[in-house]
Image (cartoon, rainbow, N blue to C red):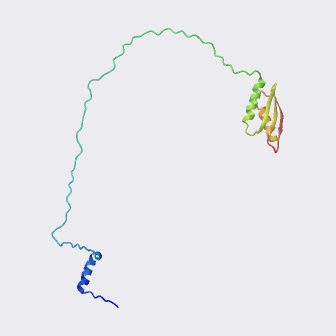
């Protein structure tokens, strides 16, 4: 069996009125009043001019001047000075106990500073004759070492006994 409920119009309106606040939107409408004789005028701003200060300060210079008092000096005769002649200065260079040691050190210095040489080179000096021993990398380096040794002052002759190790390390 079916039951049909009929609602009266008044009860339908009452239910609709109860549900209205949750569904309704509030719309506010603002209407501009129409008055033609009233205008908005912003407040007037006042600007003030402040002139710069015109006060000048002047300080009078001092009228009292102080000068250093004059020194009271009297003439004194210079003392008699006597200079004695100092003995002459003699400068002596360090002496090598023989010329061979100096020549050996000079040849070693020249060979060590030549960047073209690589290897182990021994230097011996006897009565201004230099003997080179050891190993270098190439025959050209052996000739360079001999030429460097001959360039040192005091060297009379150079015996080149350097061996070359071509293809191997010295």
Compared with 49, 92 (above or below) is above
In the rendered structure, the answer to whether residue 25 lies left or right of residue 115 reads left
Residue 25, horizontal then vertical, whole percent: 28, 75
Given residues 90 and 12, the one toward you in this image is: 12
Residue 86, horizontal then vertical, whole percent: 60, 12
Please say whether residue 122 is visible from this viewpoint.
yes
Given residues 156 and 117, the one toward you in this image is: 117
Residue 67, horizontal then vertical, whole percent: 32, 21
Q: Residue at x 82, y 33 (%)?
A: 133
Q: Residue at x 26, y 78 (%)?
A: 18
Compared with 72, 40 (above or below) is below
- Residue 129 placement: quadrant: top right
Residue 149, horizontal then vertical, whole percent: 78, 32
- Residue 72 placement: quadrant: top left
- Residue 161 placement: quadrant: top right
In the current view of this chain or complex, which residue is farthest to the bottom? Answer: 1
Q: Residue at x 29, y 75 (%)?
A: 22
In the rendered structure, the answer to whether residue 99 lies left or right of residue 1 reads right
- Tell me the quadrant of the picture where the C terminus can be found: top right
């Amino acid at each position: 069996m079916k039951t049909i409920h009929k609602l009266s119009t008044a009860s339908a309106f009452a239910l609709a009125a109860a549900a209205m606040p949750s569904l309704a939107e509030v719309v506010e409408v603002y209407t501009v009043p129409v008055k033609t004789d009233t205008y908005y005028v912003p407040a007037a701003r006042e600007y003030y001019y402040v002139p710069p200060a015109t006060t000048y300060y002047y300080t009078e210079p001092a009228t009292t001047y102080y000068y250093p008092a004059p020194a009271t000096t009297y003439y004194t005769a210079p003392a008699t000075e006597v200079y004695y002649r100092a003995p002459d200065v003699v400068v002596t260079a360090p002496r090598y106990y023989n010329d061979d040691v100096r020549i050996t050190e000079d040849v070693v210095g020249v060979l060590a500073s030549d960047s073209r040489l690589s290897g182990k080179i021994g230097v011996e000096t006897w009565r201004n004759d230099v003997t080179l021993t050891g190993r270098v990398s190439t025959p050209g380096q052996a000739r360079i070492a001999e030429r460097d040794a001959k360039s040192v002052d005091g060297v009379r002759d150079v015996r080149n006994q350097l061996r070359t190790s071509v293809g191997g390390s010295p």
